[in-house]
Amino acid sequence: MNQFIQSLVDAISAGAVLGLAALAIGLVFGVIRLANFATGEIITAAAYSLILTWHLGWYVSIPISILVAVGISLLMELAVFSRMRKAGPATLLIASFGLSFLLQRVYELIFGNNVRTAPVASELAQSVEVGGIRIQMLSVTTIVLTAVLLIALQLFLTKTSLGLQLKAAAADFRTARLVGIPAGRVIGLSFALSGILAAAVAFVLTVQSGAVGPDFGVRITILALVGAVIGGIDKISGSLAGGFVVGFATSMLAAWLPEGMTNFKDAFVFVLVIAVLLFKPSGLLIKGRGVVRT
Amino acid sequence: MSNTTSAKATTQSLRWRLGPLWSLVSLLLIVVAATMVTTMFGKSLQVQAQYALVNLVIVVALQLFIGTSGVLSFGHVAFVAMGAWTVGLLTIDPTLKKNLLPDLFPFLMDAQAQWVLAVLIGGLVGGLLALIVAPVLMRLNGLQAGIATFALLGVVNVVLTYWSSIGPRSGQSMVGIPEVLDLKLTMLFALGSIIVAWLFQRTRPSRLLRAAREDGIAAAASGINIVTQRVIVFTVSGVIAGVAGGLFALTNRVVQASQLFVEMTFITLAMLVLGGTLSLSGAVIGTLVFSAIDVMLSNLQSGIDIFGLSLSIPQGTRPIILGLILVLMLMFKATGLTGGREFVWPFRTVRPLPGNPPTNE
């Protein structure tokens, strides 16, 4: 039982991280139909910033990592995606795939192929015992951090004018423009928020591993993208929920699959994904079929 | 009078039939010429050319599916991996195999085949996997199709990496694949794949699918079962990709699951996008141009001398430039170098292949 609760907490925390990453993808997708594969490289950039500046103190390092993430995210938009407004989602996905590959090689060139290490917030890597249950501090921190971020995002999206504009644009970009919402500002905002979320994801992952290499963000982005799509990338809540489901499932499978099968956990998740896509191609949280089935 | 009309009609229809033949012949000539040029240079260039030809077969397979259906596939490298695995298992020396891959299923341990046969079996295995997954995957469009095919690649990669009953123990590689394939033989396979793809693009399923690509609703309303047509084309394209995997195994002579994953998917997609997804000539031109740039950059990276002036670019810039090429191409000319057109006979106008405008799906 205790073991189950431990794995449950870990799974919720894994789901929370992936949910944030999927949200980072979904926010941008809602506005410009871009499923940004290069979100992983925003995460990687934030992780490098944390690792390389951690010795300056967390109050310096964390803001720097957020700034770097937001900066890179906006730079992607300005340099590449703003020039591709007429392209369809599939073309945009391939372009972001190329950008991801490109940035990974740039990181390799700058930081080398070996991982860089630093004990980022190593206090959080310990575990505490509560009523006979060993709980990782990081899992709790992750869950709290995610909750705070989600509440803040929710308040921003419903209580501020800018947030409402973004929400409207994510729901229906064309109509939003028709009623006079400035497209450029909203798009920039979605990229900036995506950068902040990516920085949060990078923080959790960096505490977990204490090391970062050029392909640091790839695996989580693949899973987050997959999660966002099965949850319903058209809706902000869909991306979040889908990411959570994938993270939760992966973590639970890792904990409970029989010995010798754990290596195959990603395969099970991918099969699950194909099954979900087959029955609900537009996503779990979207009502009806949504896409034209031909 | 009627006689001359019918004679005229016959010549015209002959021209219609033979005219497009140039779109095949020109591609074959280009590939042969490019290969012949590389044989005039050193051994290392020939090795690079052989890899380029293997990639060409993969890109032809990709184009056959993506170009005809307008549906994105990140999953073709899964079929390539199946082909490579098959050829590895069938051609490694039996004693070596016992030591290297001790956990194999008995029937795989005993299986052995001559390499040409092994490559063809590899194609069948790739096609079989495609046929099995197609009825599920082919229902999806756009982004969902991209994600689902990627999920397929993920499953295959995990299974090949960790399942030691069908390959090496986790993370290890298959070595000892015989050195039998040379540049000319690879070229023959590449030419063969182009011919097969070209012929197949003239068959009914391909035509129906091109119609569906242009307007899915109209095609469905005309009674085309799009899923069925997609399954057929996907399977054929899976066979070609499987063959390409076999060729990769024989060229690289070491096979590891990690080589057959995201990076190969990226490189081959980049080649196709560079040339243009909508035409077979796009696949050929894209692969050749991309490979030529790749070779030049890798030579520049190791430094070359021009008139006593040594030129070089820093290590690691090569993949960056290749990535840039893909991104810039998509930004400024998403239809690729060929713009989705096939080569036409330069001296007299013939009917171009149907379907040129790019789909934004």
Image (cartoon, coloured by chain):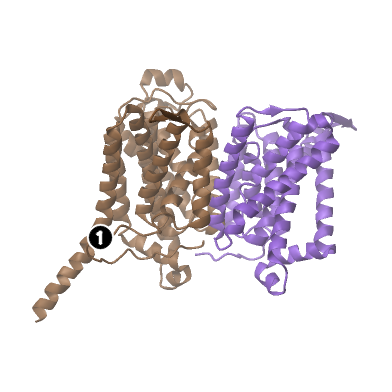
Question: Between residues B158 and B22, which one lies in front from this camera angle?
Answer: B22
Q: Quadrant of residue B191?
A: top left
Extreme residue toward the right, this view:
A131
Whether residue A280 is visible, yes or no, is no
Across the whole image, how many numbered discs are drawn on residues? 1
Horizontally, residue B61 falls left or right of residue A277, namely left
Q: Position of residue B346 (x, y in %)?
A: 25, 60
Quickly name the residue at label 1.
B346
Where's the N terminus of chain A, which quadrant? Answer: top right
The spot of residue B128 in percent (x, y) is 40, 45
**Callout 1 crowding tier (Cα within 10 Å): few <14, some 14–19, many ≥20:** few
Of residues A33 and A112, the one nearer the viewer is A112
Of all residues, the one furthest to the bottom in this rendering is: B1
- Which chain's colour is purple? A
Residue at 68% in and 55% down:
A26
Q: In the rendered view, would you say B8 is above or below B356? A: below
Asked whether, in this view, residue B116 is left or right of residue A153, the answer is left
Instruction: Identify the secondary structure beneath mark 1.
Output: loop
**What residue sits 39% from the left and 40% below the top?**
B292
| Foreground of the two, A264 or B11 | B11
User: In the figure, what tint was chain B given?
Assistant: brown
Q: Is residue B237 left or right of residue A137?
A: left
Q: Nearer the viewer, residue B238 or A111?
A: A111
Residue A30, how many percent across, how many down? 67, 60
Specify the amino acid type for callout 1.
Answer: Pro
Q: Position of residue B84 (x, y in %)?
A: 41, 35
Q: Residue at x 61, y 39 (%)?
A: A266
* Above or below: residue B91 compared with residue B20: above
Judge whether residue B49 can be spotted in this image.
yes
Q: Quadrant of residue A151?
A: bottom right
- Mark 1 falls within which chain? B
